[in-house]
Every structure is written in C-alpha cells, then in structure tokens.
Image: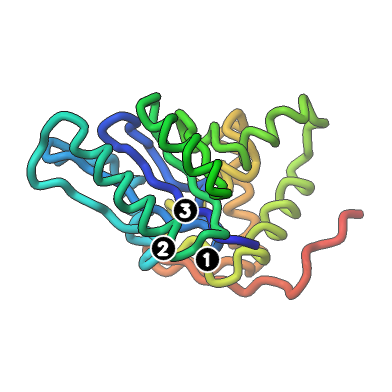
Amino acid sequence: MRTNYVLVDYENVRVPSLALLNGEHFRVWVFLGPKDTKLKVPLVLAIQEFRERAVYVTLKTGGANALDFHIAYYLGSLAKADPNGFFHIISKDTGFDPLIQHLKTEKISIVRSVSIEAMPCFALEKEVGPQPKLNDEELLSAVIADLIKRKTARPRTSKTLLSTIHAKCGKELAASRIEGIYEALVKLGYVTVDGARVSYSLPSEPLTRR
C-alpha cells in the first residue's frame, strides 16, 4: 500500500482528532500559525501516539498566505521524494486548487479535502449507502480484525483506543456500546491496561463469525 501524506492547514480547519489516520500507511503534518497556541487534547495525544509518523510545523512569523506557502513547500519536497505517494491537503482554502491541478498534470496523486472525514478513502465508505447494523459481537470482531491489521500502529493509550474503536464502528454509535467493546477486549485478554497505557495479546487471525 502506498504512503498517504496528509498536510493539515490547522489555521483553516481545526481538526479535532487524527483517529482515522492511525494506519501505518499515513504520514501527517499539522501546520500551525503563530496564534495556534491552544490545541485540542485528542490532537496532541494523537501526535504523540503517531511518533515519527506525525509532526507539527509551526510558523514563528505570520503574514498573508504564509502558512499556505509553507504547505506548498513541504508538498513539493515530499512529492519529489516519493512521486508515487498519495497527497492530501486538509483545508477549505480553494487557493490550493490551481497548484493541485498543476501537480495532477505532473502525474502526482493529490486532492484537497475540507476535513479528514471527507478524504476520498473515507468518503468512499459513505457513498456505499446505508449498511445493515451490526450487533455487538460483529462489531467486536470488526474491531479485533482492525487492530490485528494495524500491527505496530495500534493505539497505545486507553483514550486513543476508544477513539479508534469509535472511528471503526461509526461516529453514530452510542458511547456506551463503544465502552462495552473496549471492556470486552479487556475481559477477553486481548487488551491489557496499565494506567493509561494499553498492550495487546491479539489472535493471529480475525475471529470467525458464528
């Protein structure tokens, strides 16, 4: 799977979480302006969890379109280093569109999305239409399969694991059911909790539905 590079214009889009980008094939840059001094706790925790897969780029001096120029610079450098990657700009600023159109003529895969949830890889799931609702056992199996697939990119704290479960099962799912799946993982011995940290003893293959 090719690498997806996600460049977030935080001045323009205040992304609340990076839970959907927890896969090993995502790399994330969050661009902050000089006034972006108060970040949401889930975002800060996610940056820490992602380690080398996510970084901040902080502007010390503001100015008209200053952050946009920084994004364009990093985008060009990344595209040169990995021309086969898929590049995402998260911003509502249509000023990026001429640059995107030019890069497409250079055979670079790139798109601008107004949110992480609107990225093509996630929006495609919504276009499929309403799906049959899964019971708790089916949701648990889906979460276990997702965690197995993540390998070394699994959440490392209880809070991030809960966010990951929520993203996998659907944002409309009640918090009580999300917590129930989390508790089931612990009860079955697939997840071990040590303070705020979690570790895993997952099966080698996803569970077979009965």
Q: Tell me, yes or no, whether the two marked residues, 1 and 2, touch with CB atoms within 8 Å.
A: yes
What is the number of the mark on residue 53?
A: 2
Task: Note whether residue 185 is visible.
Answer: yes
Q: Earlier in the sequence, mark 1 or mark 2?
A: 2
Amino acid type shown at disc 1: Ala
Q: Quadrant of the C terminus?
A: bottom right
Q: Which residue is mark 3?
A: 5
Q: Outermost residue, left direction?
A: 61
Mark nearest the camera among 2 and 3 is 3
Q: Position of residue 209 (x, y in %)?
A: 87, 55
Does 85 appear above or below 152? Answer: above
| Front in this rendered view, residue 163 or 38 | 38
Question: Alpha-carbon neighbours of circle 2 within 10 Å: few (<14), some, or many (≥20)?
Answer: some
Report the Cα–Cα distance between label 2 and label 3: 10 Å
Q: Quadrant of residue 96?
A: top left
Q: Position of residue 45 (x, y in %)?
A: 33, 53
Amino acid type shown at disc 3: Tyr
Report the Cα–Cα distance between label 1 and label 2: 10 Å
Does 13 appear above or below 168? Answer: above
Could you tell whether 35 is left or right of 173 in the image? Answer: left
> Who's the residue at 32% across and 45% down the image?
72
Q: Position of residue 97 (x, y in %)?
A: 44, 30
Question: Alpha-carbon neighbours of circle 1 within 10 Å: few (<14), some, or many (≥20)?
Answer: some
> Who's the residue at 42% across and 69% down the image?
194
Mark nearest the camera among 3 and 1 is 3
Does 100 appear above or below 183? Answer: above
What is the number of the mark on residue 153?
A: 1
